[in-house]
Amino acid sequence: ACNLATALVELHRFDEAVDVATADRAEADPSLRLARLRAYALQQAERFAEAADAYRVVVTREPHDWESWNNLGNALAAGGLSGDAATALRRAIELAPDVPPVHLNLARALVDAGAPEQAEAALAAAAARFPDDEHFPLELFALHKRQGRDEAALAALERAATLRPHDASLQVDLGREYLPHLR
């Protein structure tokens, strides 16, 4: 069942993978490999509530599985449960604090949950922790622009442009941001 579900996932035949990785089979697998495949296939099939339930099975039995906590958070966020997503993503960060994408997922969930101040704090902390990662200043830029905080947005974009000096589109975006300041 694991091999067949894996092959079906690789072929992007997610619903068929779920049919192979039934809840009963997945929960009977002591390695949790089939349970993880089931959860992933459900998530890729955009069956987010079912995916979240399947990831909960995994994290209940393997509470130190940061990847499944992260995926649970992403499934909850995609299903519109951003507050619950933030809780799962915070747990993933506790378990794997050195994985930048989890920090981004948390910030995005916080924005979606209507907590922009918390999102800004999470992004600022992550930017300090990962100073060479341009994703955090870019997310801060987008957040500040939505809030109408043009000076803070410009500073964040300048930081991102410093980290990616050869990215032409980013340099063009920076030029656009400078225009109002030149008039």
Image (cartoon, helix red, strand yellow):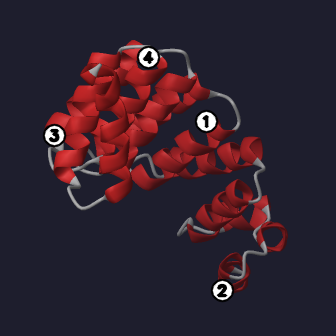
Residue with the mark numbered 4: 116
Across and down, in percent, residue 110 comes to 48, 24
Across and down, in percent, residue 154 comes to 28, 27
Sequence order check, earlier mark of 3 and 4: 4
- Mark 3 Cα shell of 10 Å, populated few (<14), some (14-19), many (≥20): few
Mark 1 or 4, which is nearer the eye?
Answer: 4
Residue with the mark numbered 3: 129
Kind of residue at disc 4: Pro
Q: Mark 3 and mark 4: span between their CA atoms?
A: 20 Å
Residue with the mark numbered 1: 77
Is the residue under label 3 in contact with that under label 1 (CB below 8 Å)?
no
Q: Nearer the viewer, residue 51 or 116?
A: 116
Q: Residue at x 34, y 31 (%)?
A: 177
Name the side, left or right, on which 152 lies relative to 89: left
Residue with the mark numbered 2: 3
Q: Mark 3: which secondary structure?
A: helix
Does the rendering let one see residue 61?
A: yes
Kind of residue at disc 1: Ala
Q: Is residue 147 above or below residue 109?
A: above
In the rendering, which numbered label is found on residue 126?
Answer: none
